[in-house]
Image: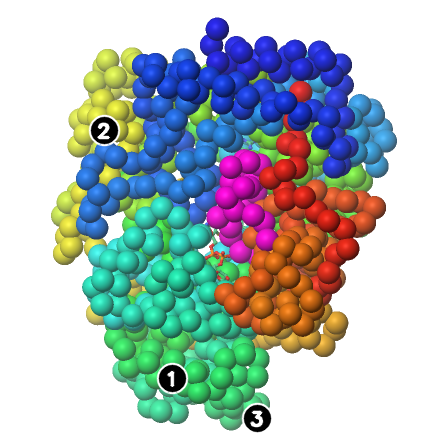
Amino acid sequence: MSLIEKARNYVMSRRSFLGATATLAVGAVAAVTLPGCGLQKVDSDRAAELANEQGEWITAACWHNCGGRCLNKAYVVEGVAIRQKTDDTHQDSPDYPQQRGCARGRSHRKMVMGADRLKYPMKRKNWEPGGGKKELRGNDEWVRISWDEALDIVASEIKRIKGKYGNVSIFAPVGGSGGGLEPLRVLNAYGGCTERWGSVSWGAWPVVWQQVTGIADTGAASGNDRFRLRQSKLIILWGANPAQSSQGLPTFNYLQAKKAGAKFIVIDPLYSESARVLADKWLPIRPATDTTLILGMAYHILTNNLLDQKFLDNCCLGFDADHMPEGADPKDNFKDYLLGTYDGTPKTPEWASQICGLSAETIREFAQEYATTKPAAIISGGAPARINNGEHLPHAMITLGLMTGNVGIPGAGVSPNMHNSSTNAGPALVKPGNNGIPTVKNPLKSSINSGEMWSAVLHGKYTESKGNVKDVNIQMIWDWFGHTINQRAGATLGIEAHRKVEFSLAQNLFLTTDARYSDVVLPVISQWESLGGLLTGNREILIYYRQIMKPLFEAKSDMWIATELAKRLGVDPKIVNPISEAQALYNQIAGAMVMKTDGSGYEKLVTLTADDIKELGAQGAPQTGRISYKEFKEKGIYQVPRSPGDKLEFTSFVDFRADPAGKKLATPSGKFEIYCDSLAKAIEKVGFTTKSPIPKYDPPREGYEDGAKNGYPFQVITIHYFRRSHSTLDNVPWLREAFPQELRINTNDAEKMGIKNNDIVKVSSRHGSVIRPAMVTERIMPGVVALGEGAWIEMDEQAGVDKAGCTGILDGHIPTGQGHTGFNSCNVKLEKYAKPLDPDVKWPQRIIF
Ligand SMILES: Nc1nc2c(c(=O)[nH]1)N[C@H]1C(S)=C(S)[C@@H](COP(=O)(O)OP(=O)(O)OC[C@H]3O[C@@H](n4cnc5c(=O)[nH]c(N)nc54)[C@H](O)[C@@H]3O)O[C@H]1N2
Ligand SMILES: Nc1nc2c(c(=O)[nH]1)N[C@H]1C(S)=C(S)[C@@H](COP(=O)(O)OP(=O)(O)OC[C@H]3O[C@@H](n4cnc5c(=O)[nH]c(N)nc54)[C@H](O)[C@@H]3O)O[C@H]1N2
Ligand code: SF4
Ligand SMILES: [Mo]
């Protein structure tokens, strides 16, 4: 009997023991977890047994929005992954490194085959058309239902809600991690829906970067590739922690730059893992105050004649009164703002020090070092800009680089270069083809910002644009490939909103927070159970992962669900699902392109014979490419050969710097815009807050200044965490054990409050409370606490606290700026919590059937 069959039988027998329904009241799952459940039990029992059996190493997807991308291989016996390993396709070397995975990737087996996988469609016991006892969402029992019943319920609720309220009442808040869009295909083909908009990821970077530099791509197009980085003399990691948030290769690449002589300065409230590995100097700064540090530095640079005046004159708009755009008030230039000529406040290091917490002396020294070391690179994560009304931060940071001319030179630059392009900026050197599935457009123009979506559901109003408040009556929420309640600010309102609507639906692999507060839950397959696909990562790699196992239990793909719903809604299934899965995969492989070694353009990557095409089960013509299909399939990766000095190196803005008049930037002035009218107008148009055309400090809502005055003496930062990719993988017991979800608090603060290591602390913001054990450490500055984002909400409704420490509970539902979410501007107060709390690794898993 195969392992999967055993697992099936095991779970089936438990199910009959438990009866046809199972309870998953909040915090009451203990009944179903006793003897080590289902797959994991069988998995561990059989792993040793199968260990010597002949299997195959197959490239397995590591498909999450994890900030890296590595080669992940599974040893598959009888259709079961019994072991994992990472890249050993070639010898490791600094110039041609292996693409090695992290602890999360190497634990994937425990997620995909987790005992808590959703196995069958389910409905809430007290559900009725229109909602039934809606207040029971999150506390009701689950009833297993057939796929037919599940799809019939979903289709009839969609029809009913459309008939009664119109398509606009169906809310499909597309995920932050940019997952599949299958539900949108069917909804759009059926008349449309209301969507969600606004970056929940890169903070204020995207619109600022685009308007000020003219480049739309925020991450990959900014900075240096890994070879050019080795030319840097000084690398400033400004609120960037690649060792944790760009796992895989980047830290290794930074170490090569360090070996080549770069000095590292880390600016971060935390003495982060990256600081530990790389930093020559650590500058602890109060969260959400970085703009003041930059202005203080800029003042020093200006008043000490450290400017690159020629670069400013030729390449930038708006630095001083002589370089302002036509029609603008000359008084509104940046130089006079720094000097305080008209507002009476010079932005001196002393002024900055009061806000950011670094001494004026430190600010001067840092400014002096930055301005006199060339080339120097400022590399920022999203974190310092992930603050309310924070557009001034990226604008000021870019301006600092412009003032010293540290831009457009190999090894220099200012960039939000993080995530999987970290340490390796530049156009993709290898990329997949288009899968050939056309998008289905939403006929409605209805979309609500993340910072207003829950209040819109609860109160029926949202901002469409400046001065344009619209009514909306949301009656259905459909969550998929995103963790909508958990991963957005204002999670308490998210729960209320889910309890208010007439129908709430989730499709996922697990009983996530969204699923828990839904009426119907649909189990989906993981990528390990799909036919396969291509994954991009850093610019040098393309991963080809294949099917590891057949779909587990009754899990189905998102596309299958959308297609079946289309049939029930009278929509042509061909619109929703126009080509086979095999054809879509083939299209990506056949269309994959690789940069020619001389950098002059792309050529086909994969040679495909008629037999290969047949094996792939697709239609197409044979073609010649750089590598054979067999090699691509067996290695599961193509990695572009590189060497220092090759024609594929990259530094942004080199061409522009060399010829500013000929190679203009795509901004209105053709230059970098320190005075950026289009940015100010773009922000104003959104309708939440305004921004000056120059980078003026504008204290963020719920930033440092706001909390100290109002009874919230601490600031919380919500960091991307080792344990998981956002919320994904949070349920893997190995990872829970290895990386506890702790509240980091400074030793002096803890002492003052009588808090010791592992004491349970209640953290409260204006928006909600969580409890977590303390990790008392000198590796965080006083006045700041840190909590990893992504823990799955586990409400103790009586006490009004989330026991898991989900940061979405603490962060406010606050729309500002370009409509991004400001997760790192949040004020909290702390108190010792009287009741004990078990480590979350000991909590029952969310197993229903
Ligand atoms: N392990 C892990 N890695 C991930 C992810 C994940 O979920 N888990 N998610 C990925 C995704 S989608 C993204 S967008 C990226 C995000 O990547 P980042 O934004 O770079 O990651 P963060 O952990 O939020 O913050 C980086 C560092 O900034 C510091 N910081 C926080 N607030 C401030 C501030 O106001 N000023 C300064 N100077 N520093 C500050 C933090 O202490 C942290 O050390 O991470 C990616 N990588
Ligand atoms: N407080 C706070 N919150 C944050 C952040 C922060 O710094 N602080 N960071 C933010 C950032 S940078 C980002 S990018 C967002 C990420 O926000 P989200 O995208 O909402 O978060 P994920 O945890 O990545 O959610 C992915 C979900 O999709 C599911 N899934 C995976 N594969 C499939 C599939 O094939 N089909 C379906 N239907 N589901 C699938 C996973 O199980 C998981 O539940 O979070 C943001 N949230
Ligand atoms: S960094 Fe991402 S892709 Fe790489 S192993 Fe970890 S989770 Fe997987
Ligand atoms: Mo993100």
Q: Earlier in the sequence, mark 1 or mark 3?
A: 3
Query: Residue at (57%, 80%) from the top-left corner?
Result: 355
Look at discs 2 and 1 and give the one toward the viewer.
1
Is 681 on the left-hand or right-hand side of 99? right
Which numbered tag is attached to residue 365? 1
**Residue 334 x %, y %:** 46, 82
Q: Marks 1/3: CA distance?
A: 25 Å
User: Crowding at label 1, few (<14), some or many (≥20) Cα neighbours within 10 Å?
Assistant: few
Q: Amino acid at mark 3?
A: Gly
Residue hosting label 2: 606
Does the residue tagged 3 have its C-beta within 8 Å of any atom of ligand 1? Answer: no
In the foreground, 678 or 72? 72
Which element is circle 3 on?
Answer: loop
Disc 1 marks a residue whose amino acid type is: Glu
Q: Residue at label 3?
A: 344
The residue located at (33%, 52%) in the rendering is 250
Whether disc 2's CB lies below 8 Å from ligand 3 is answered no
Measured Cα–Cα span from mark 3 to mark 2:
64 Å
**Looking at the magenta stretch, what is its main secondary structure?**
loop
Question: What is the span of residues highlighted in magenta in the rendered image?
Answer: 718-742
Q: Position of residue 44 (x, y in %)?
A: 49, 22
Indicate left or right for 687 with 385 as reference. right
> What type is the residue that disc 2 sits on?
Val
Q: Residue at x 47, y 86 (%)?
A: 360
Depth check: 238 or 617 in front? 238
